[in-house]
Image (tube, grey):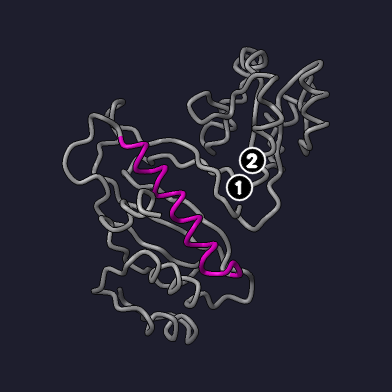
């Protein structure tokens, strides 16, 4: 990749990376941490080019994973619930509970001061009528049973706790890529590697039965604004089973 116009810090970080090499997973994680050069605590990102067709309904790759060491940031959880479920959501630590038409309208008008949206099953019909899907859908934030963000009242507290602990959804985009964060550059290497292992285990388990050929074609790790580090996709797919 051309580095013309890049700053000195980026060039110094990129010099540590062999662009022609496919690194072993643990070595790649350590290198992503080492090449983080921003003044702020950079995010460590995973990018995967998948060998599936995003146009086919039976080749979608989508699931959730609870990272063992979280994401290193405060996760703001919004819950759509009413009555006893709303009370239970507040007691479980939800940052915001939307339990009436005024709260729903506030969100449809553009208020998005949250990271994860959960809903009870009973509220989904009301959400559909409110037009929230047009606001939250394009952002990937609309509660969805497949993503585990539509829950029963009995499972609400667990879902809130998991979201705050580092529950991450991954979903194939229109260009057949997955983009997932696994923590911060300030994490020690072992914690980042364990988060990466949990993610890869979940991605492998989410492989659609209709997928043929190579499942993960290309895999890279990078810190925010940092150089891409190519990871051996085959080795990455086995670490979940090995560790």
Q: What residue sits 54% from the left and 29% below the top? A: 148
Magenta extent: 186-207
User: Callout 2: 10 Å neighbours few (<14), some, many (20+)?
Assistant: many
Q: Is residue 84 left or right of residue 160?
A: right
User: Callout 1: 10 Å neighbours few (<14), some, many (20+)?
Assistant: many
Is residue 164 depicted above or below 70 in this figure? above
- The span from disc 1 to disc 2 (Cα, nearest Å) is 6 Å
- Toward the viewer: 49 or 193? 193
Location of residue 171 by image quarter = top left
Is residue 74 depicted above or below 64 in this figure? below
Is residue 11 depicted above or below 155 in this figure? below
Percent from the top left, x then y, of residue 170? 46, 42
Percent from the top left, x then y, of residue 120? 66, 20
Q: What residue sits 25% from the left and 39% below the top? A: 52
- To which residue does mark 2 refer? 163
Element assignment for label 2: helix
Q: Is residue 64 magenta?
A: no
Location of residue 117 by image quarter = top right
Per the rendering, the mark at residue 166 is 1
Q: Is residue 194 magenta?
A: yes
Q: Is residue 138 left or right of residue 114?
A: left
């Amino acid at each position: 990749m051309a580095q013309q116009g890049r700053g000195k810090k980026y060039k110094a970080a990129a010099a540590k990376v062999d662009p022609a090499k496919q690194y072993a997973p643990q070595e790649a994680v350590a290198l992503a941490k080492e090449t983080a050069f921003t003044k702020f605590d950079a995010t460590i990102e995973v990018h995967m080019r998948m060998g599936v067709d995003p146009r086919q309904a039976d080749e979608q790759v989508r699931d959730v994973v609870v990272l063992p060491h979280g994401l290193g940031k405060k996760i703001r959880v919004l819950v759509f619930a009413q009555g006893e479920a709303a009370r239970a959501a507040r007691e479980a630590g939800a940052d915001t509970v939307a339990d009436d038409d005024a709260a729903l309208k506030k969100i449809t008008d553009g208020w998005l001061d949250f990271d994860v949206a959960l809903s009870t099953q009973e509220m989904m019909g009301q959400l559909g009528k409110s037009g929230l899907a047009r606001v939250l859908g394009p952002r990937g934030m609309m509660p969805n049973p497949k993503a585990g963000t539509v829950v029963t009242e009995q499972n609400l507290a667990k879902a809130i706790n998991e979201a705050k602990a580092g529950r991450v959804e991954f979903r194939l985009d229109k260009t057949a890529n997955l983009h997932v964060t696994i923590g911060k550059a300030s994490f020690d290497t072992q914690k980042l590697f364990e988060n990466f292992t949990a993610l890869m285990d979940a991605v492998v388990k989410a492989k659609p039965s209709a997928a043929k050929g190579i499942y993960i074609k290309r895999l890279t790790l990078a810190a925010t604004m940092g150089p891409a580090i190519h990871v051996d996709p085959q080795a990455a797919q086995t670490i979940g089973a090995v560790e």
